[in-house]
């Protein structure tokens, strides 16, 4: 079955799978509005009991973590947490995600959440560049922290800890093309018009790919590379969903996405030959996602218990499968075939917090100016 037929035959399934896989992007596929604490506004959650739970934990996150019941982990996590703890969990998914809380803190109004789930390094830079006072508290003592893989910690000030990670890669239709091995060979004439990627100003996935080019060519060379990409007819769309949908519709044979794509494809019985992975220069850009407790949270101790809950082996494994990501810990319980489907790059690369602070906004602005002018 070709990809277009697959989409037609399994349209409903694919649409929710986009949302689930969008969690890989970390934040650029938000599609729901739920900027209040009414848990009934977030898909995959249930209304709370009128009695029983002693405490309520409000967790802000990106919508794809909760709004796709068939693949997103939100509803499953809520059920498991509430079964074990005498507490009610409410997901809060504002459309502008962590910016929502930056704006509220700047306006001097109540945050109305206890913690945020889905932070990445450039989110944390944005928080610190836009607030004089801190948004998050010190992470403190959280069970399971010692199991987090070396190299995933991204907050030098100890406020956020990772709960999963993804690697940006090319995904290509192996029945239509063979993807290049290097950034330079991506510029070959034979690949003209073959690549779809995302706008780094509006997409976490596109931003990660842009940062990978900065990593590869340096702050003084990445714009020249993008000029060459434009000459080779690269197509830039607004979000991961836009790009993946266009690729799935056979508009081009290659798309910037995630090296766990075959996990998603296998869940939908797709032809894995059409979901091949390529790491340019044998590298994948790492994009760990973290969680942090808001400074002034109503239930900080419960928030830290929740963080420890998420780092348990069985929870880590289930989140990885449902969110189509890699777990953050060494001890996660994963299906036997997961390692065959989710590919780790030979050389993970990423920018740390101190490298991005003061730089990432300028790199994106310069890219926007150049891309718009060409």
Image (spheres, rainbow, N blue to C red):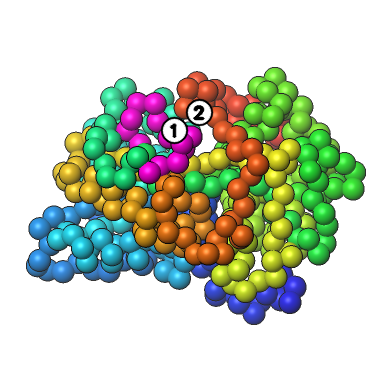
Location of residue 105 by image quarter: top left
The answer to which of 219 and 145 lies nearer the viewer is: 145
- How far, Cα to Cα, is label 2 from label 1? 6 Å
Specify start and end residues of the magenta stretch as a single range.
147-160
Q: Name the residue rendered at 65%, 42% in the picture.
A: 346
Residue at the image point whose x is 48% and y is 42% from the top = 288
Q: Position of residue 333 (x, y in %)?
A: 42, 59
Q: Is residue 86 visible?
A: yes
Q: Is residue 186 left or right of residue 13?
A: right
Question: Front-most of 329 and 220?
Answer: 329
110 lies above or below 19: above
Q: Is 151 contained in the magenta span?
A: yes
> In screen coordinates, is 87 left or right of 285?
left
Does residue 325 appear left or right of residue 83 in this picture? right
Q: Predominant secondary structure in magenta?
A: loop
Give the residue furthest to the bottom: 9
The residue pinned by badge 1 equals 154
Q: Quadrant of the C terminus?
A: top right
Evaluate whether residue 98 shows in this view: no
Question: Which residue is denoted by mark 2 in the rendering?
Answer: 352
Number of callouts: 2
- Residue 66 falls in image quadrant: bottom left
Marks 2 & 1, CB-CB < 8 Å contact? yes
């Amino acid at each position: 079955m070709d990809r277009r037929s697959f989409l037609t035959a399994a349209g409903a399934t694919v649409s929710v799978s986009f949302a689930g896989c969008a969690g890989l992007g970390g934040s650029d596929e938000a599609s729901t509005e739920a900027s209040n604490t009414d848990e009934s506004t977030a898909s995959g959650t249930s209304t709370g009991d009128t009695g029983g739970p002693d405490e309520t934990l409000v967790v802000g996150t990106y919508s794809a973590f909760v709004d796709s019941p068939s693949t997103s982990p939100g509803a499953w996590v809520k059920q498991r947490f509430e079964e074990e703890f005498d507490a009610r969990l409410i997901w809060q998914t504002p459309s502008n995600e962590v910016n929502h809380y930056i704006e509220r803190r700047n306006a001097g109004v109540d945050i109305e959440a206890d913690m945020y789930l889905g932070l990445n390094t450039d989110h944390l830079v944005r928080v610190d560049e836009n607030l004089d006072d801190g948004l998050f508290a010190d992470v403190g003592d959280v069970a399971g922290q010692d199991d987090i893989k070396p190299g995933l910690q991204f907050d030098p000030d100890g406020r956020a800890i990772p709960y999963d990670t993804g690697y940006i890669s090319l995904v290509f239709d192996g029945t239509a093309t063979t993807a290049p091995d290097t950034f330079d060979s991506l510029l070959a004439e034979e690949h003209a018009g073959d690549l779809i990627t995302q706008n780094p100003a509006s997409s976490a996935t596109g931003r990660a790919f842009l940062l990978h080019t900065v990593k590869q060519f340096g702050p003084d060379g990445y714009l020249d590379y993008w000029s060459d990409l434009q000459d080779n007819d690269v197509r830039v769309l607004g979000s991961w969903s836009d790009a993946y949908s266009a690729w799935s519709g056979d508009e081009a044979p290659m798309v910037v996405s995630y090296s766990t794509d075959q996990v998603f494809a296998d869940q939908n019985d797709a032809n894995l030959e059409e979901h091949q992975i390529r790491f340019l220069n044998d590298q994948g850009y790492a994009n760990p996602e973290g969680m942090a407790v808001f400074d002034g949270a109503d239930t900080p101790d419960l928030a830290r218990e929740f963080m420890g809950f998420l780092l348990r082996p069985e929870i880590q494994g289930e989140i990885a499968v449902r969110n189509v990501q890699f777990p953050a810990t060494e001890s996660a319980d994963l299906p036997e075939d997961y390692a065959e489907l989710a590919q780790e790059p030979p050389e993970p690369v990423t920018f740390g917090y101190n490298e991005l602070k003061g730089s990432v906004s300028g790199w994106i602005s310069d890219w926007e100016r150049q891309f718009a002018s060409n």
